Amino acid sequence: MMTTVKKQNVMIPPYEAVGVICAQSIGEPGTQMTMRTFHYAGVAEHVPTGLPRLIEIVDAKKEPKKAIIDVHLKSAYAKSPTEAEKVAKELASIFVRDVARVEDDLETLTIEATFSEKDGKGQSVTFNMLKKALEPFCSEMKVSENKITLYPAKEKPKETKAGEKKEKKITAKYVRRLTQKIREAIVKGVRGISRAVVVKDEDGYFVRAGGFNIVGACLNPAVDVKRIYTNNIKEIERVYGIEAARKAIIKETRDVLEMQKLAVDIRHIMLIADAMTYSGTVKSIGRHGLSGEKVGVLGRAAFEETIKHLINASAFAEEEKLIGVTENIIVGQTVPVGTGKIRLVMKHRKKG
């Protein structure tokens, strides 16, 4: 009997204004957030925390300002700091510009890459690795000591409307563009992951790096595929799906609030995550997302872009059914939540 009573106490009553309570419960302590910065073990200083990070989450940004990826390792590698250091070096992306000086010669239409042995040694990159990275960009290559002269490969011919293939000449503009591409080419590591450092936790050592690339990191045999995490919610949605993205929204929001020592019930955060993900994709809570998709015209107009919404509604003869809270407050009616929605019917007993 006791369990039934407990269950009854935690249930939400019909027509409870959960959205309003949720907004109040997060908004009120949210105004008291301090702008303290938190250091992520030297990987990406000033990773947004507090209010800026909370805005990033609810706006469903494609990329956070400073993305972080935590790569946990298999037990054999996690126990040894030297093994973890090796994995960190394998994951961090090193570009051609980091180990070589790339210059173009527009007179001879060639590109020259000069390998720096000092930088190469520091980044564990050999001359052969650089040579291999440059091969896709040239038709011919001349090597002399630590210099590589590249003769650019022609661009793929474009098909004309008649179906003929038009060959493109190598121009100075093309060589200049290719030089920039070569500088950005990867010699070693995983694209999108940079500045990897080894961090110790209760389970052993793991790698924390700037950037994100879950699929690329998982290709490393030392990485524990089941325990890899990034603070980029869109990347989690792309790789693992919408349920994982929902969990990530809850975790990230909770972390922000806990870091500021604000106690907010998990159910409010879950409601935000549910509202953002119920459609199957992560949507923001702005005018381009949930608020801009409200059913009522007045509800949309009350938020942002008032004139636009009212003119569109007038032009297309939209009907306002006064379903939401905002619309009813505007017209001065009882709000259709809580006691404003339920009508009591009583049977009156006749005396005698």
Image (cartoon, helix red, strand yellow):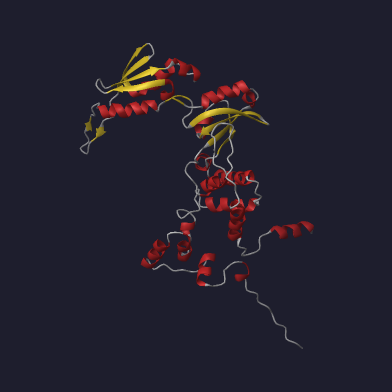
The x, y position of residue 288, in whole percent, is 45, 53
Q: At x 49% / y 55%, what residue is drawn? A: 290
State whether residue 179 is above or below residue 23. Answer: above
Name the image quarter holding residue 308. Answer: bottom left
The x, y position of residue 246, in whole percent, is 56, 47
Q: At x 36% / y 22%, what residue is drawn? A: 102
- Looking at the image, the residue that sits furthest to the bottom is 352
Q: Is residue 100 left or right of residue 15?
A: left
- Looking at the image, the residue that sits furthest to the top is 145
The x, y position of residue 61, in whole percent, is 48, 45
- Number of numbered callouts drawn: 0
Name the image quarter holding residue 42. Answer: top right
Q: Is residue 50 left or right of residue 299?
A: right
Q: Quadrant of the N terminus?
A: bottom right
Q: At x 66% / y 60%, what residue is drawn? A: 12
The x, y position of residue 306, in whole percent, is 43, 62
Q: Quadrant of the C terminus?
A: bottom right
State whether residue 68 is above or below residue 24. Answer: above
Q: Nearer the viewer, residue 192 or 217?
A: 192
Q: Is residue 128 left or right of residue 45?
A: left
Q: Is residue 10 left or right of residue 209?
A: right
Q: Nearer the viewer, residue 150 or 280?
A: 150
For residue 293, say whether it is visible: yes
Q: At x 59% / y 38%, what residue is drawn? A: 38
For residue 324, say whether it is visible: no
Q: Nearer the viewer, residue 219 or 209?
A: 209
